[in-house]
Amino acid sequence: MSIWEYANPVKFMRTSGAVLPWLVGATAICLPAGLIWGWSVPEDYKQGATVKIMFLHVPSAMMAINIWVMMLVASLIWLIRRHHVSALAARAAAPIGAVMTVVALVTGAVWGQPTWGTWWEWDPRLTSFLILLLFYLGYMALWSAIENPDSAADLTGVMCLVGSVFAFLSRYAAHFWNQGLHQGSTISVAPGDRISSVYSYPLYTCMLGFFLLFVTLLLIRTRTEIRRRRTAALLAREMRA
Amino acid sequence: MAVLVRVHDLAVSRGGRRAIEGVGFTLSAGEALILRGPNGIGKTTLLRTVAGLQPPTQGRIEADPDAIAYAAHADGLKGALSVAENLRFWRAVFGGPPVEPALAAMNLIALAERPAAMLSAGQKRRLGLARLLVTGRPVWVLDEPTVSLDAGSVALFAGAVRAHLAAQGAALIATHIDLGLPEARVLDLGAHKAAATAPARAPASFDEVFG
Amino acid sequence: MLALLIRDLRLATRAGGGFGLGLAFFLIVCTLVPFGVGPEGGTLALIAPGILWVGALLACLLSLDRIFALDWEDGSLDLLATAPLPMEGAVLVKAAAHWITTGLPLVVAAPVFGILLHLPSGAQGWLVAALLLGTPALSILGAFGAALTVGLRRGGLLMSLLVLPLYVPTLIFGAEAVRRGAAGGDGTTPLVLLAGITLATLAAIPFAAAGALRVNLR
């Protein structure tokens, strides 16, 4: 059995319906656990209690980028293999990604105020996220503006491809433009980790929790989209009969 | 007679919905085929599919895409350009025959330097036909070509189509009014209206996948 | 292809074609900014590279919907799609016509606007070079946005939302080159990067725009 069979809406609905309760359960355990664990870590000697914003900021920022990558992959699958569920999944993911971006920006501002002494700084990473948010908004606006779902899926797919390239370009352009305040990558597998395990384990838990939250929301929203398409199709058929 | 267009078991969709299915016909040089059917059945969609502007939902169209000249309600004419400038542009794009014979054939020589915006509806239609001539393509695919025309202009249109057919051209015309071409074959699309439960042999659109 | 270019240029320069509107808009932006920030030459000189680039961006954006919308309405786009000319070529030519009617006048007039905004004379050359290398990318990216939204009623606002984020890299490198020039430095590095982006978009975007047009035509 190939993975492409899940592109069949009936099969997708059946499988996702079976998986969904487990996902909801796992999210309900993992996300609060990670956040509470993160809340209870000792304060950082330099940043104090504000360091705890990290447990919201880092996972949401990570998901903001990962969701766009997922949309890019889903758009490619739609454009190349014409699997309708894939296009709907990309559509369903966009608002989640936009919210993750906003969370990352807002928590970043709240964290930046005590740390850098400013709510907003045109730091390359912040700027990149703002631009990413613009791409999310444009993508969602284009989906909702086009009536024919097939054309909408095609056009947003092309827009996602071009947007990905330019989001990437903008990121490097922003680095060129302003060197920035952000610390380098905080978690790395290289020797000499810069983050203590006191922080890293709850952070990993939060990341997993955010990831599970995304997958759960994505499945729910894709199922809603499929049902919406199905009602529209049935309505059209009824009007014609 | 050379067959210019051959259509097999064609189905087309409009707005994601299967509109017509099971359409098949051949069009040979010197022939005109008139597509009839009630409003909204998908005549325009069928013509656009034959012209290669959209892919068929199902079935096959055998035709050289460089043989077809498509003309819809809008003629692709720019009001700010003169009649001759409009024609010269489309001639350059399509690489067809020179402009002057087309102007003469459509009785437009006196109007050649007039801006297209100043033409009457009938004159515009004649310019549209002249545009078809300068494409130099044998198969005319025409969507409601005589709409908003008076009787004299309709007769002029019929004469132009006859001349085109006599020159081994062909025409595929969708209309619901009389064209004054009694010799043309007629295909009634009413019999090809897609069934409400469209067979999803190869689902082409969201509505067919999720219907 | 040449015929299409000549037709588009002719249409733009005839009555109602909107030729020069972008330039007038650019002039208004450069007139209004001093009212907003105050007439001190030092302040103006500081922000001039940014204002000039943002003004060029907006002036370019203003006329984007004309690239395909008019040809869509009168059916020319259908006919172009069935013509022997490849759609990618048509996109490139129409973007070129847009650049000649909006981008090129801006490039030529930019030094005058630079004087209005107290741009240091050493930066004038950089400004012209940066606009010359950057504005073609604005036109071709705009053609992509216009192709995405061509069939939509009220597509203009949506198009701005889609196109402006694509302008970010061009704006950054273009303004940076002028800024370095204004500071008496060497703007070659951003200028080279700017040219790279323009070349890459010219090579790749026509395919995306032609794909979007084909989707919108069916």
Image (tube, grey):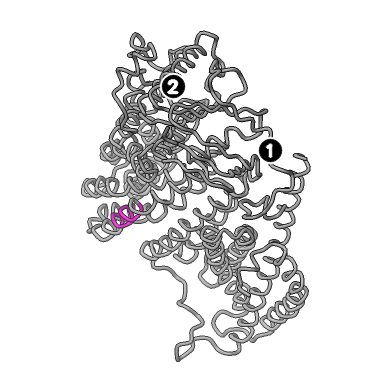
Three-letter code for the amino acid on which mark 1 is drawn: Lys
Question: Can residue A177 be seen at all in this image of the molecule?
Answer: yes
Viewer-proximal residue, B124 or A42?
Answer: B124
Q: Residue at x 70, y 57 (%)?
A: A225
Q: Residue at x 43, y 30 (%)?
A: B29
Q: Is residue C4 left or right of residue A137?
A: left
Viewer-proximal residue, A201 or C119?
Answer: A201
Secondary structure mainly formed by the magenta segment: helix
Q: Position of residue C116 (x, y in %)?
A: 31, 38
Q: Residue at x 38, y 52 (%)?
A: C171
Q: Which residue is mark 1?
A: B193
Q: Position of residue B120 (x, y in %)?
A: 47, 12
Q: Position of residue A229 (x, y in %)?
A: 71, 52
Q: Residue furthest front?
A: B1
Three-letter code for the amino acid on which mark 2 is drawn: Gly
Image quadrant in which you'd find residue C187? bottom left
Question: Can residue C156 be seen at all in this image of the molecule?
Answer: no
Image quadrant in which you'd find residue B180? top right
* Residue B83, magenta (yes or no): no
Callout 1: helix, strand or loop? loop
Image quadrant in which you'd find residue B22? top right
- Determine which of the numbered discs, if any, sits on residue B128 in the image: 2
Q: Which residues are magenta?
A: C194-201
Task: Same chain for labels 1 and 2? Say yes or no.
Answer: yes
Kindly identify which chain the residue marked by label 2 belongs to.
Answer: B
